[in-house]
Amino acid sequence: MPVSTLRFVKMSGAGNDFVVADNRGGAIEEAEKPPLARRACRRKLGIGADGLILIERDGRRDADYVMRYFNADGSEGELCGNGTRCAAVFAREIGAGGTSQRIATPAGVLRADILSGSAAAATVRVAMAKPGPIRRLRLSDLPGGEAELFALEVGVPHAIEVVPDVGVVDVDRRGSAIRRHAVFPAGANANFIALDEGSGEIRLRTFERGVEAECLACGTGATAAATVADRFFGWPAAVPVRVASGDLIHIDGTGDAPLMEGPVTRVFEGAFGLGRASTQPPAERPEGR
């Protein structure tokens, strides 16, 4: 029987915002999940968020629970770094996990540790998916001119362009062109980074696949940015990444799996009337981020 009301918590991971709900009882059926994400995440007409996170269980013994992540366009993502941190705090609140958790995602089982804080505000560290091989690409047909890109996967595909100043990049136009470029058949998140030697920080702006807009933060993007800075530009493997919200995400790539540490904030909670989710427009591109 489809549910008529969704109890949710709105959470933010360094500005990347999510609708998070407990679906361990399976009340939200599989076919309902993409339209629910589109409706709930729709700003001004819904709750408003970059994505929907559902905490589920499937009987597996290698993880405390399953995290399902759906982008704002209804597509399911293999992994969301900031969303994983939010899921960990919410899961502890509902009793699905403790201070240290193992979280099953389509990108594999990840470890999350809540380092400090409460349900209202916490700091969480996640052992991320190991970055894949890096390709160097040069594209000449982009708004604003040609670009050298570094392409890699951190659970999901990313493209990195190193620029002098992220503040002057037209992220919407240039990011959208990179995200949909033919060189990325499945699409890619487009990241623009500046290596600020004065502060020792990487500055990051991201156009997110599945959200189809710039987001205030991207955890997998921060991990990809730190990986490129380390391997190609001689930056330390452990580095702070300043995202568009102004928050810092700390990446430590000195071990086998990169560690991503950052803030989680509880924004508000409530009940969302589901109504006729089928009346919402379908996603243009059924792809994860």
Image (cartoon, rainbow, N blue to C red):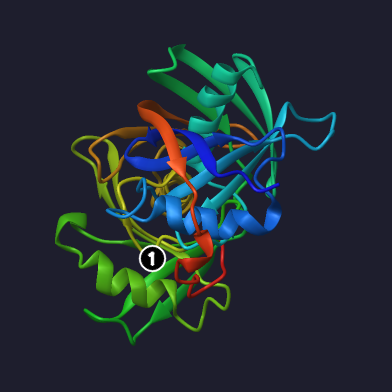
- Residues 146 and 117: in front is 117
Q: Name, please, the residue furthest toward the bottom.
A: 141
Q: Position of residue 247 (x, y in %)?
A: 28, 34
Q: Which residue is mark 1?
A: 212
Q: Position of residue 120 (x, y in %)?
A: 38, 18
Q: Position of residue 75 (x, y in %)?
A: 56, 62
Give the residue displayed 59% in from the left and 50% down from the top: 131
Q: Is residue 18 left or right of residue 285?
A: left
Q: Element type at marker 1?
A: loop
Give the residue displayed 18% in from the left and 38% down from the top: 198
Give the residue displayed 32% in from the left and 55% down from the top: 45
Q: Is residue 80 left or right of residue 57?
A: left
Mark yes or no: residue 29 visible. Answer: yes
Q: Position of residue 255 (x, y in %)?
A: 60, 32
Q: Is residue 60 left or right of residue 230?
A: right
**Residue type, numbered disc 1:** Glu
Q: Is 226 drawn above or below residue 270 in the view shown? A: below
Q: Quadrant of residue 239?
A: top left
Q: Is 52 drawn above or below residue 85 in the view shown? A: below
Mark yes or no: residue 77 visible. Answer: no
Q: Name, please, the residue furthest toward the left.
A: 168
Q: How many marks?
A: 1
- Residues 111 and 288: in front is 288
The residue carrying pointer 1 sits among few (fewer than 14), some (14 to 19) or many (20 or more) residues within 10 Å by Cα, namely many
Q: Is 183 drawn above or below residue 77 in the view shown? A: below
